[in-house]
Image (cartoon, coloured by chain):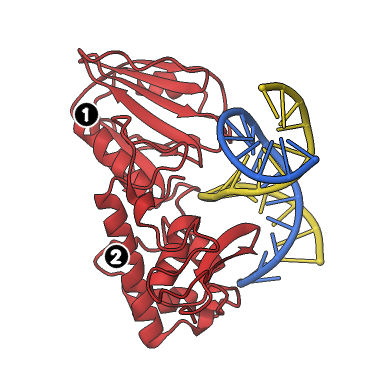
Chain colours: A red, B blue, C yellow
Amino acid sequence: MPELPEVETVVRGLARHMVGRHIRRVEKNRPDLRAPMPVDLVARLEGRRVAAVRRRAKYILVELDDGTVVLAHLGMSGRITIALPGQAPNRQDPHDHVVLHLDDGTVLRFNDARRFGRIDLAEPGALEAHPLLVGIGPEPLGPEFDGALLAAALAGRRTPIKAALLDQRVVAGIGNIYACEALHLARLSPSRLAMTVVGARADRLAAAIRDVLERAIAAGGSSIRDYVQTSGELGYFQHDWTVYGREGEPCRRCAASASVRRVAQAGRSTFYCARCQR
DNA sequence: ATTGGTTCCTGCTGGC
DNA sequence: TGCCAGCAGGAACCAA
């Protein structure tokens, strides 16, 4: 499922092949994903040059030469694949909702079977005020992110820390998998009240979040069933998961047998070690 | 104001 | 072997 590391991996792949290129032609194969796409999407993109590709939270930001920014969210099944000029063309699929053709022959496909993804535009100079980005919390890989900042974001929150980590207003980019992994690394119980994560616990959690996200990016993200890098290659961080998807197995840290449990929190699966997470 | 529940969507999986 | 209900999940939205 695309969380911060998967989106970051996609952004790096896109930046490598899009920046400086002109968008020659755009195919928009349906009007909507999770929400309607801009009606003038094709006209706003065709003929423009790509100035930069960046990431904010789980959003891919493609900045055009007129200052317009394309916001793309992969939802849970979204993928973007790139076929370079001279390579075999990537195969057309019924869920290829938007296809970009660049001036050098590169073809990019936004594919999303479940259509939980999203594509929108921000007017020049108005990115910060875009409704999808307003209120999103700090970037966990930013230089200012630490235990104190995290504790401040959690202050007054009477919800389990696991649920709080999924709230994009608290920290940007964390999803179900990395919330579980970070809590395990920090030895914190997922059901602990968010507002009690202060001091050394907050320091530990902030460091764990940074650590797990950085290692996941280095591995090209985690691939389960949908996610692939822009090259079509799989990420391989799923092999390094310590709790996610390991219900009934021994803890990889404390080695207690069958200590990895699964519970439902806010309608989602939480995996944790019943022995070493407090 | 914060929080919990619902909803969107399709493909895969597990149980019979 | 085949069928299908149930599940997976990000985040907007709604209700309390």
Q: Which residue is mark 1?
A: A17
Amino acid type indicated by mark 1: His
**Residue farthest along the bottom direction in this orientation:** A199
**Observer-nearest residue: A98 or C8?**
C8
Task: State the image coordinates of residue A69 (x, y, percent, origin top left).
Answer: 35, 37
Give residue A100's quadrant in the image.
top left
Above or below for A148 versus A168: below
On screen, residue C5 above or below A21: below
Query: Residue A16 placed where, x, y %?
Result: 20, 33
- Residue at point 55% right, 80% down? A156
Say which of A212 and B7 sits in front. Answer: A212
Q: Regarding mark 2 in the picture, which secondary structure is present there?
A: helix
Residue at the image point whose x is 45% and y is 24% from the top: A41
Percent x, y for residue A77? 50, 37
- Mark 2 highlights which residue? A211
From this viewpoint, is residue A175 visible?
Answer: no
Tags 1 and 2 touching, CB below 8 Å: no
Letter of the chain that mark 2 sits on in the rendering: A
